[in-house]
Image (cartoon, rainbow, N blue to C red):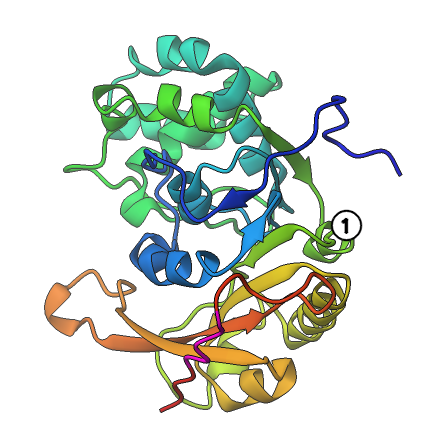
Amino acid sequence: MKSVFDDGQRPTRQHGAQSPSVQPFLKWPGGKRWLVPELVKIIEEYDYVTYREPFLGGGALFFALRPHRSVLSDINSDLINTYRQVKNRASALLEQLRPLPINQGTYDGLRECCPKSPLQRAVRFLYLNRTAFGGMYRLNQQGKFNVPFGGGERTTAPLWEYDLLTSSARALRGAKLLTVDFESALSDAKKGDLVYCDPTYTVAHNNNGFIRYNERNFSWEDQKRLSRSCHSAAARGALVIVSNAYHREVFDLFGPPRHIAVARTSRLRPDVTHRRSVDEYLFVFPPREAGKAKRHDRGRVHEK
């Protein structure tokens, strides 16, 4: 099958993070900016040619690594359209966004409208993302965005004040952007690929309510599909890393060759005094046909 990067040039093997990193332009629930340093430590043990991320979201790791070649995908078509517009039309997006006032009326108007053009859809997506409460992305049963206006410091200004869109456009130059299910995206992973999966589970606490709590976000059947896909990709020679819930059933399902427990502060509660530390897993599936890691595997295994 012809590669999506069939440009007649030999791909350059990448190693670790490229410099400089770029700050993500989206605020995304469950984003992994806090986890990037730990992820980079793992990735530095390996070489890779193509970076793949099947649950793109805010793309924190992608923007930290700035890989030369990547396949970025998500099932959310509005999200992928926004990335495409940022990649190809960042200046036009800024021209449309800057005049829009930040107030309840403008927010409500954009929330209710359904623009047809890809550019206008991206303008709406970026405005709502930057001004919605908590940067949340939530649809009701009719498929309509239903997050309330954030107010206060929620504004689109950082997109141009910190050069977020234009720097992101540069980082996305070598990216292929696809709207596909994660299983389809993972089926293309092969030797020389680095795959990072951050499924849309929600971790509010470490207890046995995990499966019920997550069924609408990422069902148990989805977890099973992801586990199978990760093992298959590693067997074809890809390095696969998965962020997942710190839960015994999840650990038993994935049966990872390596796992690391990491802790973060939950931001699901607006009152900072009620936020708590929540554990999550990092599952690592080293490539089984791509040779050994560059350095001796330190076997960093930590389970509480």
Q: Residue, x 38% and y 53% (percent of image)?
A: 31
Q: Residue at x 74, y 58 (%)?
A: 183
Indicate the quadrant where residue 124 lies. top left
Q: Residue furthest left?
A: 273
Residue 208 against residue 5 in the figure, above or below: below
Q: How many marks?
A: 1
Q: From the image, which quarter does the C terminus lie in?
A: bottom left
Residue 37: x %, y % from top left: 32, 57
- Type of amino acid under label 1: Asp
**In the rendered image, which residue does mark 1 sit on?**
188
Instruction: Pinpoint residue 137: horizontal percent, then vertical percent.
Output: 44, 47
At horizontal 35% and vertical 16% (from top left) the residue drawn is 97
| Disc 1 crowd, CA 10 A, few/some/many (<14, 14-19, 20+) | few
Q: Nearer the viewer, residue 52 or 7?
A: 7
Would you place residue 227 above or below residue 113 in this image? below
Residue 200 left/right relative to 63: right
Report the quarter where the N terminus lies.
top right
Which residue lies at the image location 38% right of the left edge and 49% below the top edge? 136
Give x and y (percent) for residue 88: 54, 16
* Magenta residues (range): 296-300
- Secondary structure state at the residue bearing disc 1: loop
**Going by the picture, which residue comes out furthest to the right?**
1
| Location of residue 263 by image quarter | bottom left
The verdict on residue 285 being magenta is no
Residue 61: in sight, yes or no? Answer: yes
> Is residue 8 shown left or right of residue 212?
right
Instruction: Name above or below for residue 249 compared with residue 261.
Output: below
Q: Main secondary structure of the magenta part?
A: loop
Q: In terms of image quadrants, where is residue 303? A: bottom left
Instruction: Judge by depth and name the residue closer to the eye, 179 or 69.
Output: 69
Where residue 130 sits: x, y (%)? 32, 34
